[in-house]
Image (spheres, rainbow, N blue to C red):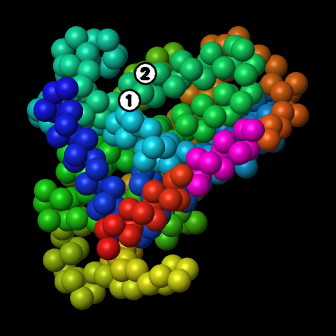
Amino acid sequence: MSEYYITGIMRKGLLCVLLLLFANGTGWTWGFYAHQKINRLAVFTLPEEMIGFYKHHIRYLTENAVNPDRRRYAVEGEAAKHYIDLDVYGDSALYTLPRYWKAAVAIHSEDTLKAYGIVPWNIDKVRYQLTNAFLKKDVKNILRLSADLGHYIGDAHVPLHTTENYNGQLTGQVGIHGFWESRMPELYSGQYDFFIGRASYLKEPQMEAWKAIVSAHCALDTVFAEERRISTEFGTDKKYSYETRGATTVRVYSKDFSLAYHKALHGMVERQMRSSIKMIGNFWYTCWVDAGQPDLNGLIAYEPTKEELEERQREIDSWKRKHIEGRDHDG
């Protein structure tokens, strides 16, 4: 096992600690609220032949949009599927990293790639799996993989998922991760325009996944620079406030500071959420078309078995235990 792999895994373990301390308890990538909203809205981009099935199961697709985040505590290798640290590969990595997995492995070891994140390649892998599930009319896996694919595509649109400085820990901006992807959507997504239009077929889906990475990474300088500038203007005493979450009082970025930052981003969070929704719809539609456009109406009546429901509950319970243990350990 290479030292690159060990370093990356240790660093991502630290991310869990930092986000539990600073992300307002909402979880990791995009925050649970945003991931669920994005998956739910993606359903309404689908054509008539698909939307009946997806709307019938919209609750599942919404609630399970966060399953990959829950699994990161229990499943080895899950964390690497959510991000890619482009900057560790050099200044030109955004344009020189191979877009396809085998070509990337031929240049960099698999351990190295996994240590620094594989989200764009993982999106393509899950796309293949979902297409296969459509071919087999495997409803359980159509739903599971649709929810997972939506999550990973959403992650690819988060600028802080494309850098080694994922939580501002290298620039004295610790907490920016949860601030950008959780607090911003929670406070302001009610004002966003989510009229996206219809899903469209992707001739080169893997290239589309990389377009999301490019767009997110190009926004990174603004994410850091505006937070630093506004922090200087506000000062620590006005930057943070306290809110009650259930029985707990937590420190959060103040609403005044959050509003100033949101305005300074000039619609960035809204654009990234809109792009996530549209791309998820595009990928779901592309998988269905590539599988030969199977009739989904006959699958609408599917209901999970008792064993499947128990399995889902075990996964949720496992996440809750790990989440609480992590918070207790972190003090």
**Residue receiving disc 2:** 206
The residue range painted magenta reads 307-317
Tag 1, which secondary structure? helix
- Judge whether 42 appears above or below 302 on screen: below
Whole-percent x, y for residue 84 in the image: 29, 36
> Quarter of the image holding residue 37?
bottom right
Residue at image point 37% right, 41% down: 79
User: Is residue 316 rendered magenta in the image?
Assistant: yes
What label sits on residue 120 in the rendered view?
Answer: 1
For residue 2, side relative to residue 52 (left or right) = left
Q: Amino acid at mark 2?
A: Gln
- The verdict on residue 180 being magenta is no
Spatial distance from mark 2 to mark 1, Cα to Cα? 7 Å
The reply to whether discs 2 and 1 touch (Cβ–Cβ < 8 Å) is yes
Q: Position of residue 85 (x, y in %)?
A: 24, 39
Residue drawn at (39%, 67%) of the image: 327
Question: Given the current orientation, which residue lies at the most extreme bottom position?
Answer: 237
Vertically, is 291 above or below 262?
above
Q: Position of residue 152 (x, y in %)?
A: 47, 38
> Is 110 in front, or is 215?
110
Q: Nearer the viewer, residue 90 or 216?
A: 90
Question: In the rendered structure, which amino acid carries the disc numbered 1?
Answer: Pro
Compared across the picture, whether 76 is left or right of 144 comes to left
Q: Residues within 10 Å of mark 2 (few under 14, many from 20)?
A: some
In the displayed structure, 314 sits above or below 258; it is above
To which quarter of the image does residue 193 belong? Answer: bottom right
**Does 203 sit left or right of 19 as displayed?**
right
The residue nearer to you, when weighing 106 against 277, is: 106
